[in-house]
Image (cartoon, rainbow, N blue to C red):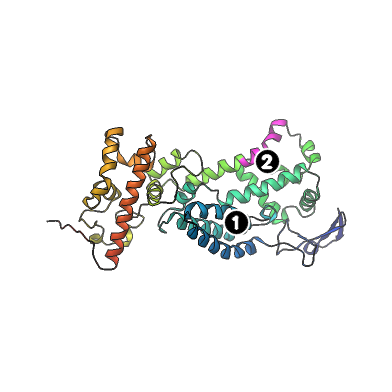
Amino acid sequence: MRLLLGRYLNRTWEVRGKRVREKAEARYLGVELIGGEEGGINSVEENVKKVASVIGMAKFAAKRSGSRFVVGREAWKSLIVSRVMYASGALVWNENVRKNVERMQSEYGRWMWRLERTVRNAAVHGESGWSSFWEREVKAKVAFVVRVLEEDLLVARVGGACLMEIGMRSKWWKKIGKMTEELGVDVLSNLVWLRRMSAIGVAEMGICEDERKRMRKVELERRVQEVGRMRWEEQLQRNERTRRYAQEKREMKLELYADGQDGAGVRLMMRGDCLPVRMNECVRWKYGEDERRCTCGEEETERHVLFECVLYERLREEWLRRWREERGEEDLVEGVLGFAVTSADLERLVLRSVGKIWKERKRREREKDRGQGPGLTFVRE
């Protein structure tokens, strides 16, 4: 690599005949690759702006497909995430941009599950079985760092040269240093801060074989997943149920029950303790004291709606009978949460029954909002 121009704000390098010039807009390792008619690359902000129309097309295709949940989820992973993450390993992410795409993912997840905005983001994230954009960004950057450390190709040499010439004045490398500290990979963090990102630097640091294994891509990605899960669990420390959900959710993957139907949505909301019944704290603030009652006159709690309300008695008869036959006096909440070990038939019956109950409850709420009143009411004496 040969330096052509000396000022920091307008540095130009030449690598094997290719010119490399620093450009803040692209923030590609602090530089812009010159080539083609226009040269340069898109920033993360530009990538995010371009996905708005793609999201609309993905939703349209999913709704027309007859399998909104399955098609919508695959469209998000294969079309939208790939566009946002294009070249993200070498791009500097603005914190506001990451928050924006995380918000987009949560909103898309709610649309996919047919949920209200009061449902917790952590519950949508966990049950949808996808990574956060923080995890995706760190994995992409870690993979790039491993290339710089282990390979001798053009891209790796450019990355190493940027570290040597610009150092921690490069926001990209400064962020890499902070990420490695957050992951707890002290050896890699020291290599970055001391500008020793090369085979020679590793040898000079006297790094042992065990520490080198920790810097391999597979081990680093595993560590990213561990830290990502800990960050997810921190969002679920609100009460006993959410803490239990975080413990019971062994792997951050899509479970078999998840099909986007009403019953699956009820399970997701119950696990996140955010089923929007009138006495739940997530929506309670919207109603006055005299508005927190069910149509039948009782206080509208999740237990009342799903297990006790006389308005939905017909919809739960078979479920309750089968549950008592197979599980005895075990709490019905365990079945809705999916934490009880049951037969496949009973599992499907539970989800189908709570889905019908919740669908009927939403219908009655719509009629109440229109001022028509439900078809059947009970008055307390």
**Magenta run includes residue 219:** yes
The residue tagged with tag 1: helix, strand or loop? helix
Magenta segment includes 15: no
For disc 2, the marked residue is 217
Provide residue 111's location: percent of width, then percent of height.
Answer: 46, 58
Discs 2, 1 touching: Cβ within 8 Å: no
Q: Residues within 10 Å of mark 2 (few under 14, many from 20)?
A: some
Instruction: Judge from the rendering whether residue 317 lies leftward or rightward of residue 268; answer left or right.
Output: left
Q: Is residue 1 visible?
A: yes
Answer with left or right where residue 98 lies relative to residue 204. left
- Overall secondary structure of the magenta section: helix
Residue 273 seen in render: no
Q: Secondary structure at mark 2?
A: helix
Q: Which mark is residue 79?
A: 1
Characterize the local packing of mark 1: few (<14), some (14-19) or many (20 or more) Cα atoms within 10 angstroms. Answer: some
The image quadrant of residue 194 is top right
Q: Earlier in the sequence, mark 2 or mark 1?
A: 1
Question: Residue 30: horizontal and vertical position, in percent?
Answer: 73, 58
Which is more foreground, mark 2 or mark 1? Answer: 1
Q: Quadrant of residue 76?
A: bottom right
Q: Which residues are magenta?
A: 209-221
